Image (cartoon, grey):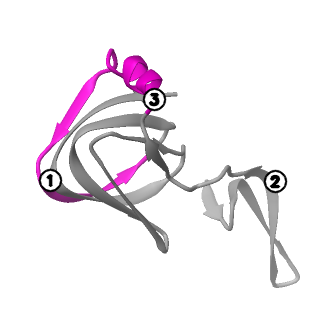
Amino acid sequence: MQKAVQGFTIMKIQVLLKRGIYFFVFLQIKKQGNMDILVRKATDRDIAAMKSKPVWTCEVSQFDWHYDSEETCLLVEGEVSVSYGSKSVSFGAGDLVVFPQGLSCVWNVKKPVRKHYMFK
């Protein structure tokens, strides 16, 4: 079992029953990193580094997404807002965006997207 709880991932839980009372023993707990999406204007160096990376395109749409790995992307075209938890960020052409590993979010593609991307 793996479950996120207030900045921690519980990897394994053991349930013990003693005298009619259930005890939950957390055997493995892993602290999660920062779950914020980072957005900034891409520098010339960023653009040069990302140009050789694969390209992903998407039409106007809305969908759920989960990041099993950290992703860095450079938006070449488009406009997007991404909601996660109680937060939301917007970005567009010329922005460099980093999505942390473990993030679950909702993408709202407002204008068709073309981006270069890489996973760590």
* Above-or-below relation of 54 to 31: above
Residue type highlighted by circle 1: Lys
- Residue that mark 3 sits on: 119
Of pointers 3 and 2, the one earlier in the residue sequence: 2
Instruction: Inspect the magenta stretch and tell me whether residue 11 lies in it.
Output: no
Residue 68 in picture, x, y percent from top left: 48, 41
Residue type highlighted by circle 2: Leu
Between the C-alphas of marks 3 and 1, the distance is: 23 Å
* Above-or-below relation of 20 to 80: below
The residue shown at (54%, 49%) is 102
Compared across the picture, whether 26 is left or right of 88 comes to: right
Q: Quadrant of residue 72?
A: top left
Q: Quadrant of residue 20?
A: bottom right
Mark 1 neighbour class, 10 Å CA radius: few under 14, some 14 to 19, many 20 or more: some
Under circle 2, the secondary element is: strand
Camera-side residue: 33 or 51?
A: 51
Between the C-alphas of marks 3 and 2, the distance is: 30 Å
Between the C-alphas of marks 1 and 2, the distance is: 46 Å
Residue type highlighted by circle 3: Phe
Q: Can residue 1 be seen? A: no
- Label disc, if present, on residue 80 of the rendered structure: none
The residue shown at (68%, 68%) is 6
Mark 2 neighbour class, 10 Å CA radius: few under 14, some 14 to 19, many 20 or more: few
Of pointers 1 and 2, the one earlier in the residue sequence: 2
The residue shown at (54%, 43%) is 101
- Closer to viewer: mark 3 or mark 1: 1
- Residue that mark 2 sits on: 27
Camera-side residue: 32 or 30?
A: 32
User: Are the residues tagged 3 and 1 within 8 Å (C-beta)?
Assistant: no
Q: Which residues are magenta?
A: 43-67
- Residue that mark 1 sits on: 111
Under circle 1, the secondary element is: strand
